[in-house]
Image (cartoon, coloured by chain):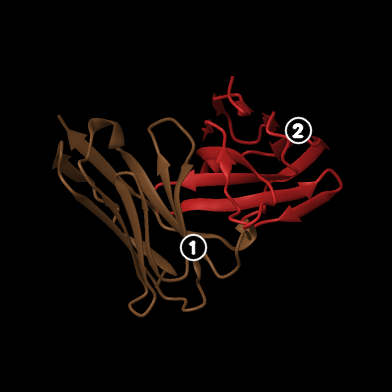
Amino acid sequence: DADVTQTPRNRITKTGKRIMLECSQTKGHDRMYWYRQDPGLGLRLIYYSFDVKDINKGEISDGYSVSRQAQAKFSLSLESAIPNQTALYFCATSELTTPNTGELFFGEGSRLTVL
Amino acid sequence: QKEVEQDPGPLSVPEGAIVSLNCTYSNSAFQYFMWYRQYSRKGPELLMYTYSSGNKEDGRFTAQVDKSSKYISLFIRDSQPSDSATYLCAMSAEGGNNRKLIWGLGTSLAVNP
């Protein structure tokens, strides 16, 4: 089983619908992240969380919200989806190490299409 | 101008070739440099991590950093079809600080048998 699991893997929805992407991890890492990947724009950080009580906005948080339900679970919500939120979404985890490389462990991605 | 520039390719080489993948950057404060590999329909995975200037070798892979030219490279020797993937460079001024990690767009590599 994957260490970082994302559901759903693929989703097609309509403009205005609420969408939730879920992420769970078995790596025991405190730090979790949500990224989106777009052709020509690369990977961009949406939100990150360093522990259950910590939520922080990333580079492109507008139109998104997150919930850290437990150390192992981090969900991304689109309250009212719009077509330019069509993208490949990745959840990732990391932990503090020595040296602190910040190595990210990614899930397999959730492909979201908003019509 | 983007902080990190990476030629998207695609790059197509025959099996056994030496591959050179490159990124340039503009921020002289960057000291931590990473190469991630992303297979189709998968998330990226860390391939190489380098601090400051110099070379780092791991098997068939060598990461090189030239801070004076603001240029980093990833060399793949004896390339294999299994190396076919997109290679993303990433860098930051602070070690382990993924909040400020700057990503290249990735170079798509195909190694043909």
Residue furthest out toward the top: A1
Q: Nearer the viewer, residue B65 or B24?
A: B65
Pointer 1 local density, CA inside 10 Å: few below 14, some 14–19, many at least 20: many
Q: Quadrant of residue B7?
A: bottom left
Comparing B32 with A34, the one in front is B32
Residue hosting label 2: A72
Q: Position of residue B69 (x, y in %)?
A: 33, 77
In the figure, A66 relative to A59: above or below? Answer: above
Mark 1 residue type: Met
Q: Chain of mark 2?
A: A
**Callout 1 secondary element:** strand
Please, what secondary structure does the residue beneath circle 2 have? loop
Name chain A's colour.
red
- The residue sitting at 15% across, 39% down in the picture is B16
Task: Kindly report the distance in space between the C-alpha atoms of the residues bearing marks 1 and 2.
Answer: 27 Å
Q: Is residue B2 left or right of residue B14?
A: right
- Left or right of residue A58: residue B103: left
Could you classify mark 2 by the number of other residues whose Cα lies within 10 Å: few (under 14), some (14-19), or many (20 or more)? many
Residue B41 location in percent, x, y?
43, 30
Which residue is painted at 52% across and 77% down in the image? B29
Q: Is residue A86 above or below residue A4?
A: below
Dot label at residue B91: 1
Discs 1, 2 touching: Cβ within 8 Å: no
Q: Hue of chain B?
A: brown
Question: Residue flagged by tag 2: what amino acid is it?
Answer: Ala
